[in-house]
Image (tube, grey):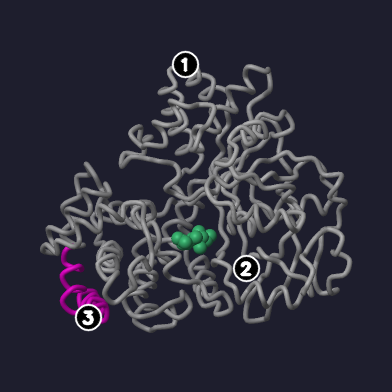
Amino acid sequence: MHHRLCQKLLDRLPGSVTVPSYGRGAIRTGIVHLGVGAFHRAHQAVYVDDCLNAGAKDWGIIGASLRRTDTRDALEGQDGLYTLATRSSDGEKLRVIGSLSSVLVAPENPAVLIDALSDPAIRIVTLTVTEKAYLRAADGRLNADDPDIVHDLAHPERPKTVHGFLTQALERRQAQGIAPFTILCCDNLPANGTTLRQVMLDFAHLRGRRWVDHVALNVAFPSSMVDRIVPATTPGDRARISATLGVDDAWPVVTEPFSQWVVEERFPTGRPDWENFGVTMVKDVTPFEEMKLRLLNGAHSALAYLGLLSGHATVDEAFAAPPLRHFIDLLWAEAATTLPAAVSGQTGPYTQELAQRFANKALAHQLRQIATDGSQKLPQRIISTSLARLEAGHGADHLALVPAAWIAACEARGAALPVGHFTDPLDAGMTALLTRRTSPEQAVSDVFDLVGFARGHDLRHTLLRLVTMHLTRLRERGVVSALAHLDGASS
Ligand code: CS2
């Protein structure tokens, strides 16, 4: 049997594998990361590892999982080390990352995470907890009725939500005269720092103390745009990577060569010198964020639903299908016109690069992974883009096919697609609604009501009409015909 990847075996790895060049014992932790999934380990943890390799000592990371134990279980047996596998048609490059010092599992012992967050050495809290963990209502404000929020208000010492953990630690720090940490959101939300700040202020308000002012005046919430495609690691990846290493890595991550991080420059208590390692520090991240959400993530969601309905399993496979590829080009053309002036000149090269990234066959990025949580993703990826087009007096025919394909893909679960092939926090309501098999018009309107898409918007009806037209066609004649009809309409 092989040994496990660990600190003392690092010097026995093959010469082709890059390993941390720093003494890990001398690194002090300065960052707590909430949501220590594959994305964090292939992105922020790598930028921090770069800083540590260059001699920084104060920015080790304590990772925290808010639900699952698997990352902690795997990494505690390998001194927090794991392999980053960068894959492209040129092959696979392996690098061992050492920036994670430990992983906590919040539900097992919430007090330990609050203690870690209250440590004066911690100056930044980063988050990748996915869209749904922010618990936003359709209007973007905190959903105060969420059972976990209700729980956290009643039991502030044993929180479950990010809002509860961050607030409890900020209160403790204030009581002890410790400056607040900077909170750096790294999730795919529009104006993600501002969005998190708003739900944190709403939560502080519900705590009914003077925390609203404290958070509003003293806590920095820079926004950031994060980008790296990170497919879920498979058992095959683990076996292949372990075979190359000559030791077992139970928890490697697989990613693409491309990586981008654009961060707003607002860190009152300091930060690693990320700008030396490829991070772009800016005053306002919004244009970059919108370009990424509307072009990359929007196309991803389109490929996910249309691809699954066409029998494809991965992004590269769906993107190689000529009708889908053609559709994505037209979707990009629609979305590009909605972007702010600061980036509107960059959309050509940007989508060309995206096309290369989507074609990366070595990633086998599963469409079902992207299809997950559509109710949380589509508002910023597709719905706001469609409304911006309609507001400007333009058509949104291609954009509007995506929510229709999402509804059709939800309907296909248990029929053409396996039950539970992808999931959504609103699945219970969606399934109840879609099994009634009402008319396309009724179904679209009910789904939009349930998930809050375009709620209260003047052009909601115009959008509903477009989505209904597409759902009718998808139900009656399938994807090929829906795409062909669009071509007919636009030629
Ligand atoms: C994807 C993203 O799963 C998804 O919904 O669209 O995770 C995407 O791969 C990343 O945002 C790329 O940076």
Tell me if I can see residue 346 in this picture. no
Residue 485 part of the magenta segment: yes
Where is residue 330 drawn, in percent x and y? 35, 71
What is the secondary structure assignment of the residue under circle 1? loop
Measured in 3D between alpha carbons, the distance from the residue under mark 1 to the one under mark 3, in whole angstroms, is: 58 Å
Residue 215 part of the magenta segment: no
Q: Residue at x 62, y 36 (%)?
A: 113
Give the numbered dot on residue 474.
none
> What is the quadrant of residue 208 in the picture?
top left
The reply to whether the residue tagged 2 has its Cβ within 8 angstroms of ligand 1 is no
Look at label 2 and name its amino acid. Val
Look at label 3 and name its amino acid. Ser
Where is residue 15 drawn, in percent x and y? 86, 73
Badge 2 is on which residue?
254
Query: Horizontally, is 302 left or right of 36 in the view?
Result: left
Measured in 3D between alpha carbons, the distance from the residue under mark 3 to the one under mark 2, in whole angstroms, is: 36 Å
Look at label 1 and name its amino acid. Arg
Tell me if I can see residue 491 in this picture. yes
The reply to whether dot 2 and dot 1 touch (C-beta < 8 Å) is no
What is the secondary structure assignment of the residue under circle 3? helix
Where is residue 94 drawn, in percent x and y? 73, 70
Q: Residue at x 64, y 56 (%)?
A: 41
Q: Which segment is the magenta one?
A: 468-491
Task: Please rate how many residues cluster around mark 1, counting C-alpha atoms within 10 Å: few if below 14, some from 14 to 19, many from 20.
Answer: few
Vertical order, 355 against 20 (above or below): below
Observer-nearest of 243 and 144: 243
The reply to whether the residue tagged 1 has its Cβ within 8 angstroms of ligand 1 is no
Query: Horizontally, is 23 left or right of 294 in the view?
Result: right
Badge 1 is on which residue?
209
> What is the quadrant of residue 253 in the picture?
bottom right
Which quadrant does the N terminus fall into? bottom right
